[in-house]
Amino acid sequence: MPESVYIRPITLADSPQSVGGDALRLGGGLIWANRFALIVRRDGRVVSRAALGMREMPAAIAALPAPLAAEAGAQWQDLARVHAPLVCGARTLRLDQPLVMGILNVTPDSFSDGGQFLDSPEVAFDHASAMLAAGAALIDVGGESTRPGAAAVWEGDEQRRVVPIIARLAAAGAALSIDSRRAGVIAAALDAGAHLVNDVSALRHDPRSAALVAQRSVPVVLMHAPGDGADLHADGAYRDVVLDVFDTLRAWRDAALAAGIARERIMIDPGIGFGKSLAENLALINALPLFHALGQPILFGASRKRMIGALSGEVAAHRRMPGSVAGALAAVAAGAHIVRVHDVPETVQALHVWRGLRDAALTDFSQIAE
Ligand code: PMM
């Protein structure tokens, strides 16, 4: 493996003013970084790591060998990339402040909400409407459980689960994403009114999906799961989980670009809980600011997942709301653009408080008295 380079923001600043302007705005959001680790890997091993201030970075990047300097220069630009809004039909979702995506699993067996909505279209519609009323910017509709060991679902069954509720919610004006890794389901969901594709296999499970997303010109979420995208929980064998997931997402982003998907329509997601141990999930969350260096909006989902249970005494999935809110806040504090959650009102309230604190920090520039 040749050498590779990474720029990981390691210190966040309250505001640019608080550090005399010596800070970079990450991903066009509300987060500013003022120290960075410049990391070089050779054959999978980290061979150098320097901690540098913002003003020291351009010279350090220029001093790298040529191919690394070009890649590091691109990452330096991409860390500060301001993302275009997502166009979802009549709705435009701005990415300059964190958004909440509400989860609607129309499955018999999802780990935390399976069976609640499959046979009750009214209950499903009411639940989605309540999430929207509580402040969800969009609803993610899924018809396949991705929990470990879940039974495979036929494409036709998956389609029958998601299409009616998508059609009904689209008619009511909701922004909607389809959580599927099958092109037939994605096409039917888009026809029914979905606006965005959320593929936990990053368009790898079904060879038809990338061309479909390109042709429909819709935004897509590329989520990381190890393996070939068939077994989403196949054990990842990572040298360094953070840098490996970064490299993999970059390769899949580039494959999506090669398939004709426009750069501004691609979002990335580290895939918390998919083929990762507790320690690996925690490392990814702590390193989330690095992922801005890919130059794509970041989506994050840890809601009610096993890691929340593992850190809190294995409480049952439906009792993991407080821990899930803590996880969403950690992601947003690292600049995640969208958090995918089950507990929308609780998460929205927490984000309002976080936003108030951020706004106060960004406008607090105590001046030296004249
Ligand atoms: N997690 C699940 C399903 N879909 N999509 C994205 N983009 N990111 C995730 O983390 C993710 C996902 C599994 O959780 P669920 O069964 O509660 O939906």
Image (cartoon, rainbow, N blue to C red):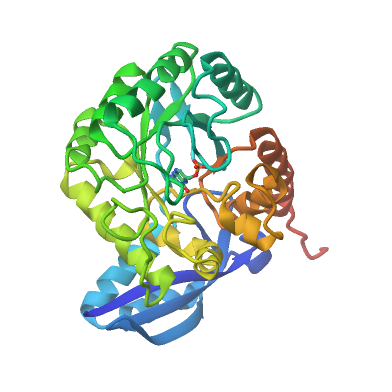
Q: Is residue 50 above or below residue 22?
A: below
Residue 177 point in image, percent of width and height? 41, 31
Q: Residue furthest bottom?
A: 47
Name which residue lies at 40% across and 24% down: 162
**Residue 97 visible at all:** no
Residue 232 point in image, percent of width and height? 36, 53
Q: Is residue 51 above or below residue 107?
A: below
208 displayed left or right of 45: left
Q: Is residue 87 above or below residue 119?
A: below
Residue 268 point in image, percent of width and height? 39, 50
Residue 341 point in image, percent of width and height? 57, 40
187 displayed left or right of 59: left
**Residue 261 visible at all:** yes
Name which residue lies at 39% across and 71% down: 243
99 displayed left or right of 204: right
Instruction: Please state which of residues 284 and 81 is positioned toward the viewer in this rendering.
Output: 284
Quadrant where the C terminus sits is: bottom right
Name which residue lies at 67% across and 37% down: 348
Instruction: Please state which of residues 171 and 355 is positioned toward the viewer in this rendering.
Output: 171
55 displayed left or right of 43: right
Instruction: Please state which of residues 359 and 254 is positioned toward the viewer in this rendering.
Output: 254
